[in-house]
Image (cartoon, grey):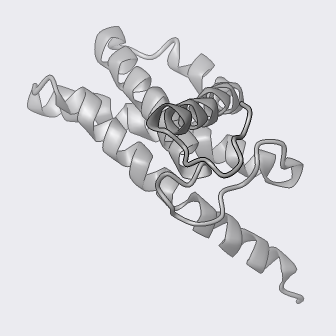
Amino acid sequence: MARRSGVRRTVSDRFERWFDFVFFAGMEVSFLALPVLVLLLGVRPIGPVSAAALASLSTTVFAAGSFRGRYLDVGAWPRVGQIRTMPVRSAYYGGVVGIGTYLGTEAYLRTGVGWAVVVVPAVLSVVALAALPRVLDALFHVSRVSI
């Protein structure tokens, strides 16, 4: 996207920039959470698990893109190509998708309320990803502490 110097960014420009962040977050989250997604293929009941996994994965993608682009500022988000955080991000994204799927499915099976299978994983994904910069800071702080 070409930058216009001295001209205020239009709504279309801002949306295009946000969409870029979401697109690349989709590739990152889908790749790094792939082991969990493969494990979810065999989980029963298929309907609620699929709906909860889709809600959790898609909300994780949109939240990661929005947080990385600082559309919702929660702290210094790791860059896409940052190798040193990749194992932590892989485990974190996989955990968010897996736990979100589990909690969404359980909420649906216990209550029978159809919207719970979508809302519970969506809320969990946003809240958990908002904490990612603080989790990474704490992890790196602990790793620098000398014994």
> Horizontally, is 139 left or right of 47 in the view?
right
Q: Residue furthest bottom?
A: 147
| Number of residue marks | 0
Pick whichever, 56 or 130, lies toward us.
130
> Horizontally, is 140 left or right of 14 in the view?
right
Residue at figure coordinates x 67%, y 44% from the top left: 91
Residue 72 picture location, percent across and down: 46, 55
> Horizontally, is 79 left or right of 33 in the view?
right
Quadrant of the rendered structure where residue 120 is? top left
Position of residue 145 relative to residue 133, above or below, is below
Q: Quadrant of the C terminus?
A: bottom right
Residue at figure coordinates x 19%, y 28% from the top left: 108
Q: Quadrant of the N terminus?
A: top right
Residue 15 picture location, percent across and down: 50, 33
Does residue 140 appear anywhere in the picture? yes
> Horizontally, is 37 left or right of 1 in the view?
left
Pick whichever, 54 or 113, lies toward us.
54
Residue 24 picture location, percent across and down: 67, 30
Q: Residue furthest front?
A: 6
Residue at figure coordinates x 10%, y 25% from the top left: 112
Quadrant of the rendered structure where residue 35 is? top right
Quadrant of the rendered structure where residue 44 is? top left
Does residue 98 appear anywhere in the picture? no
Pick whichever, 79 or 107, lies toward us.
79
